[in-house]
Image (cartoon, rainbow, N blue to C red):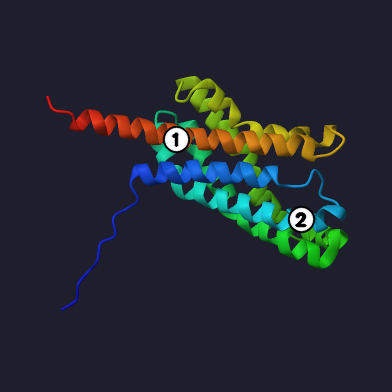
Amino acid sequence: MTTTTVVAPPTTDLRALAVTAGGVLFAIGNAMHPWEHDEAALTYPTWAGAHVVFAAGAVLVAAGLGALRQRLARSKAAVVGLGFLWVALVLMPVSSYAEAYVAPAVGRDGFTAIEESTVLFGLVSGLPLLIGPLLIVFGALRHKLLPLWITLSFLGTTLGLVLAPAVPKEGYAIIPGTVIFGLGIAAAGWLSFHVKRSTDDRDRAPE
């Protein structure tokens, strides 16, 4: 006789906490990152650690995005944006690992050659990171699904990447942008957790 064990899916509480923790790690990891992607940055004490930390944060956020989907469900655009963002976050550890450990081994020029030979992966992993937040912000603003400051913080990474070529060092735009994005994601996760708990408490309250 065989028995089947049914594993219950993660609760909204756990997913919301995963988003919160992941957003914080994403912000911390990017704050640890050097200002530039040059040869000197590869020997920076926090180079590998920064990539490992924000990649771990990306995985946690991706694992818990279902909590945000429930909150953004009224907007099809925002839900599609979450899908794009999920793809970007799931693929992020691949490029993060390569930058953390492969780039120092082959040098800046060698790693640039690798990036040029894997441009398709760069597009598949990079474009969703630009498109996803834009759709989320559009839907969240239109339907007022999140506090304004949290909604706008989702534009952090997109604006950072767009503005990077216009500043003396790319990190001057990308690092603050990704930190703001991470903290905004964390706030959205915490808000989802808090609202869910408040709803559960009301449901359990005696009549």
Specify few, some or many for label 1: CA neighbours under 10 Å numbering under 14, 14-19, or 20 or more.
many
First in residue order: circle 1 vs circle 2: 2
Q: How many numbered marks, from 0 up?
A: 2
Q: Is residue 98 left or right of residue 27?
A: right
Quick one: SS at disc 1?
helix
Residue at 18 percent of width and 29 percent of height: 205
Residue 97 location in percent, x, y? 67, 60
Q: Is residue 196 left or right of residue 29?
A: left
The residue that disc 1 covers is 190
Residue 82 location in percent, x, y? 50, 40
For the N terminus, the quadrant is: bottom left
Residue 199's place in the image compared with 14, above or below, is above
Residue 39's place in the image compared with 186, above or below, is below
Residue 182: mark: none
Q: Quadrant of residue 133?
A: top right
Residue 185 location in percent, x, y? 53, 36
Quick one: SS at disc 2?
loop
Q: Is residue 65 left or right of residue 119?
A: left
- Residues 192 and 44: in front is 44
The amino acid pointed to by label 2 is Pro
Residue at 84 percent of width and 32 percent of height: 166
The residue that disc 2 covers is 45
Task: State which mark lies toward you, 1 or 2.
Answer: 2
Residue at 52 percent of width and 37 percent of height: 186
Q: Quadrant of residue 200?
A: top left
